[in-house]
Amino acid sequence: MTGPRLVSILRQGSYLIASIHTALDDTQMTAFQHDLVERIGRDRARGVVIDVAALDVLDSFASWTLRTIGEVARLRGAVTVVVGIQPEVAFAMVTLGMDTGSVHTALDLEEGLEFLDRVVGPRRPAAAARGGSA
Amino acid sequence: MPRVEAAEWVGEPPVRDTDAVAALIPMVRRIVAARVADVTAAEDLVQETLARVLAASGRVEPGMLEPYAIATARNVVATAWREEDRQRRNQHRVVDLTAPDLPEGGLLAEEERSAVAAALARLSERDRQALLAHEVSGRDTRSLASELGSTAGAVAAQLHRARARLRVEYLLARDRTEPPTERCRPVLFALSSGDRRRQREVDAGRHLLECDVCAALSQPLLERAPQRDDEVRIPIGGDADVVAARQAARELAGRLGCFSPTDLTLLATAVSEVTRNIVKFAGSGEVVVEVLDEPRRGVQVTARDAGPGIPDVERALQDGYSTYAGLGLGLPGARRLMDEFAIASEVGRGTTVTMTRWCGNR
Ligand SMILES: [Zn+2]
C-alpha cells in the first residue's frame, strides 16, 4: 500500500493493537486480515485489539472479515476484541443482519485491553506467555 | 438570446473534473483492451480518450460522464482502426495521406446546410415555427407568448424541447444515420434536453451501453447538456469504487440536511452492499445517486450493470442466497437498510437496483 498508512499494528506486551485509520476497500481489508494474522503468529500474541473507531461503515464484507480474523486468531491461540464501533455503525450492522459473531467487542481501547487482561491474564512479554491454553 | 434561456446552458465547470475523469481510467482501459490487443497502442488510445473526456468534462453533464467516456473510447478505437485500415490499403501509394486532396471546407459547409434543412423538416410544424420565429426572426419569448396566448415560461420550455429535437435530427441527418431501434430517438431526445426524469424513464444510461449509434451521438449531444449538482454518478470498476460510491452517497445526502447521522450510515452501508454486488457479479457498472423532490424529499440510488443478471430475483432477496465469501446479506441487507427497494434483472442483460431513502422518516 502506498500513501498515508491505512492501518497500523502495534505490539504491546503479548497483545497486538491494530488500528484502522481510514475506510478500506475489500482488497485492503483482506490485506489487513493477512497482515494481522501473520503478525499474531510471528509475535506469538495472546490478545488482539482491533480499533475500528475511524470507520463510518462496517458493511457485510468488513464485518465478515473481522469475524474471520477473530476465528483464525482463536485457532492460533489469541483472543480478539473489536473496539470503537460507532453507534450509527452498530445500528446499521444490526439492521443489515450482521454481527461480529464469536468475536468480542468493547466500547473503546481501554475497555478492550481490560477485557483481554481478564480473559487471557495480565499483559506479559509474549515469550513468557506462551504455553497456556487460549 | 433572452437571459432565462441562456441560463439553461451556463454552468460552472465541476471543481473535481480531474478526479472524476481519473475515476474513469480503469473502465476506459477495459473498453480499449477488449478491442485492441497491442498494449502500447491500447495505452495511447486510453490516453487520447481521457484527454478528450477531460477537455469536454466542463461542458458535459456530470451524470453522463461515464456513458460519454464509453462512447469516446469506442469512437477513438474505431477511428484508429479506420486509420490503420486506410494506411494498409494505401501502402503502395507514395503520397502523404494526411494532406486533404479535396476542397473539403466548401463541401462541409454545404453538407451542414442541408443537414440543418433536413433536421428542421423533421420537426413538428409548431416546433419549427417557434424556433424560426425565435432564432431567425429574433422574437423574444414574451412577445411570442402573448401572440400564442401562452406564458413566457411555457414558450421557453417549448423552445428548449424544440432545440433538443433539432440537435438530434441535425446529427442524424449529418451522419446520414437512421437509429437502429425504436428506443433510440426517445433516448437521444432525453439526452439532448438534459431531462433527467425522462432519461430515467427511457433508461438512457443502459441504452448507451447497448447501442453504438446512440453512444456515438451522445458525445455531441452531451457537450451541450446543462450541468447538475443534485446528482452524482460513480463509474464502478473495482473494489475502490465501492468506497467511492458509498462516500459520494453520504456526501450528497448529507448536503440535504434532513438526514440524521444514523440515516446517512444506513444509506452508505446499503450503497456499499449493492455496489459490491456489481463488482463481484458484473465486474463493472455504475451507481447514480440523486436527490428526489417528489413525492417527497429523499435520495435515490440506482446501481446498474450489464452483467450476467440474476436468474431468480426472489431467491436473491432471501438471506443466505449469495455465496461469495460465505455471505448472503448483500441485497436483502440493503433492502432492510432502505425505505424502498426494487430490482430489475434480466439474464444476459444485466441488473438494475433502485433504492430510496426518504428524509425524516424514522
Ligand atoms: Zn440507440
Image: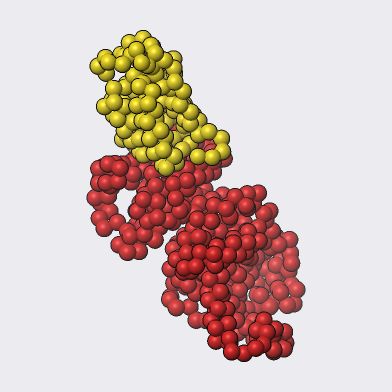
Chain colours: A yellow, B red
Is residue B17 shown to the viewer in this render? yes
Q: Is residue B291 above or below residue A105?
A: below
Q: Is residue A35 above or below residue B300?
A: above
Left or right, B234 with respect to B6, comes to left
Q: Position of residue A69 (x, y in %)?
A: 34, 31
Location of the N terminus of chain B (image quadrant):
bottom right
Q: Is residue B121 above or below residue A100?
A: below
Residue B170 falls in which quadrant of the image? bottom right
Left or right, B128 with respect to B318, comes to right
The residue depicted at 31 percent of the width and 16 percent of the height is A130
Q: Position of residue B50 (x, y in %)?
A: 59, 60
The residue depicted at 53 percent of the width and 33 percent of the height is A5
Between A50 and B36, the one nearer to me in the picture: B36
The residue most toward the front is A127
Q: Position of residue B334 (x, y in %)?
A: 36, 43
Left or right, B214 with respect to B167, comes to left
Residue A66 falls in which quadrant of the image? top left
